[in-house]
Amino acid sequence: MPQEKPTEIYVDNSSAIALAKNPIFHDRSKHIDTRFYYLWDCIANKDVEVKYAKTQDQVVDIFTKSLKYGVFIKMRDVLGVMKKLNLRGDVESKLISGN
C-alpha cells in the first residue's frame, strides 16, 4: 500500500527532534547511532515527521516507567483499558441477595 502521509513520531526531547531534523547538529554530537542516518533519510523523503509531545502525554510511559497512581489511571483510560472486575465477587453478591 502506498503511504500517502508521513508517519508521525512523537518525541518528548526537543534536542532529539532538532538533531533528527537538522543533520548539521551532527558535528556537535559525538556518538550518533547508524539508525539516525536512516531517520534523516526518512525525514528528507517525507516518509517520517518528528513532532514534539509533552512528557506527561507520552502514553507509552505506562509500559516503560513506574508511574504515580493518578498518572497510571489517566494513561490506562487513554489506552481504553478497563478496570478488571472481580467476577466471582459479583456472582457471590448476586447469589446472596437473591437477584
Image (cartoon, rainbow, N blue to C red):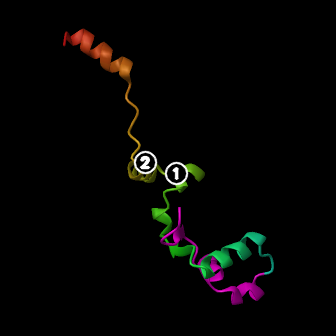
Q: Residue at x 51, y 74 (%)?
A: 51
Image coordinates of residue 8 in percent, x first then y, are: 51, 69
Q: Nearer the viewer, residue 46 or 15?
A: 46
Residue 96 left/right relative to 81: left
Above or below, 61 relative to 4: above
The relative height of residue 91 versus residue 52 in the rendered view (above or below) is: above
Q: Are discs 2 and 1 less than 8 Å apart at CB? A: yes
Residue pointed to by mark 1: 62
**Left or right side of 38 for 2:** left
Sooner in the amino-acid sequence: mark 2 or mark 1: 1
**Which corner quadrant of the image does residue 35 belong to?**
bottom right
Residue 88: image location, x then y, percent:
38, 17
Is residue 18 inside the magenta stretch? yes
Front-most of 41 and 82?
41
Secondary structure, mark 2, is: helix
What stretch of residues is rendered in magenta?
A: 1-29
> How would you rate the neighbour count of disc 1 (Cα within 10 Å): few for under 14, some for 14-19, many for 20 or more?
some
Give the labeled residue for mark 2: 76
- Tell me which corner region of the image, top left, top right, bottom left or bottom right, holds residue 83: top left
